[in-house]
Image (cartoon, rainbow, N blue to C red):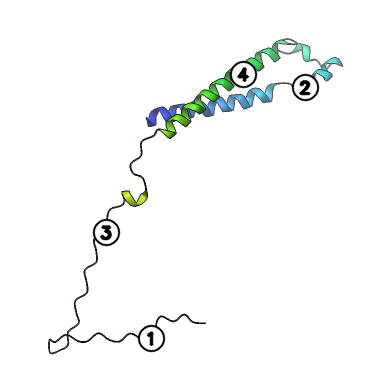
């Protein structure tokens, strides 16, 4: 599944770059006005109107391929199997810390717990 996702992603990026290149090669609407005054548009590689047809058809084909690969990526991403639902489910459970041993005096008898300082939990102002 990861192989197909990676392959379609690479194709998607290449097609997107191709669309960008073809759009940049095309003439804008204002280029026709310049051709009327003899800017030399008729001497192009594809002829006067051949370049517009070729570039627009190529852009349309690449746009269709781009949408198909994008939908395929969306489908693969939404149906990808996951190891677990959350990070908490995938972590190993830590063993509980052992309880501290009761303190004993020098005579072996258990000592009473020391009284906590009442000011230890106060927040300074």
Callout 3–callout 1 Cβ contact below 8 Å: no
Q: Which residue is mark 1?
A: 118
User: In the rendered structure, which disc, 4 or 1, sits on the residue that comes first in sequence?
Assistant: 4
Quadrant of the rendered image containing residue 19: top right
Neighbours of disc 4 within 10 Å: few (<14), some (14-19), many (20+): few
Q: Say if mark 2 contacts mark 3, CB within 8 Å.
A: no
Q: Badges 3 and 4: C-beta atoms under 8 Å apart?
A: no
Q: Are marks 2 and 1 in contact (CB under 8 Å)?
A: no
Using a 10 Å C-alpha cutoff, classify the residue at mark 3 as few (fewer than 14 neighbours), some (14 to 19) or many (20 or more): few
Residue ID for mark 3: 94
Between residue 35 and residue 124, name the one nearer to us.
124
| Residue occupying image coordinates x 27% and y 86% | 114
Q: Which residue is mark 4?
A: 60
Return the disc, 3 or 4, that comes first in the chain's sequence: 4
Residue 49 in the image, given as x and y percentages of width and height: 73, 11
Magenta stretch contains residue 81: no
Q: Earlier in the sequence, mark 2 or mark 3?
A: 2
Residue 83 position, x and y percent, is 33, 41
Badge 2 density bin: few <14, some 14–19, many ≥20, Cα 10 Å: few
């Amino acid at each position: 599944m990861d192989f197909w996702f990676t392959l379609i992603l690479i194709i998607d990026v290449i097609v997107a770059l191709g669309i960008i290149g073809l759009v940049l090669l095309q003439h804008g609407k204002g280029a026709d006005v310049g051709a009327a005054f003899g800017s030399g548009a008729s001497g192009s590689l594809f002829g006067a109107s051949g370049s517009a047809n070729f570039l627009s058809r190529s852009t349309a084909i690449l746009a269709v391929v781009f949408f198909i690969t994008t939908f395929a990526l969306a489908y693969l991403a939404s149906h990808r199997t996951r190891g677990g639902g959350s990070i908490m489910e995938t972590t190993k459970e830590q063993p509980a810390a052992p309880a501290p041993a009761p303190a004993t005096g020098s005579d072996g008898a258990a000592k009473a717990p020391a009284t906590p300082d009442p000011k230890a939990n106060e927040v300074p102002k």
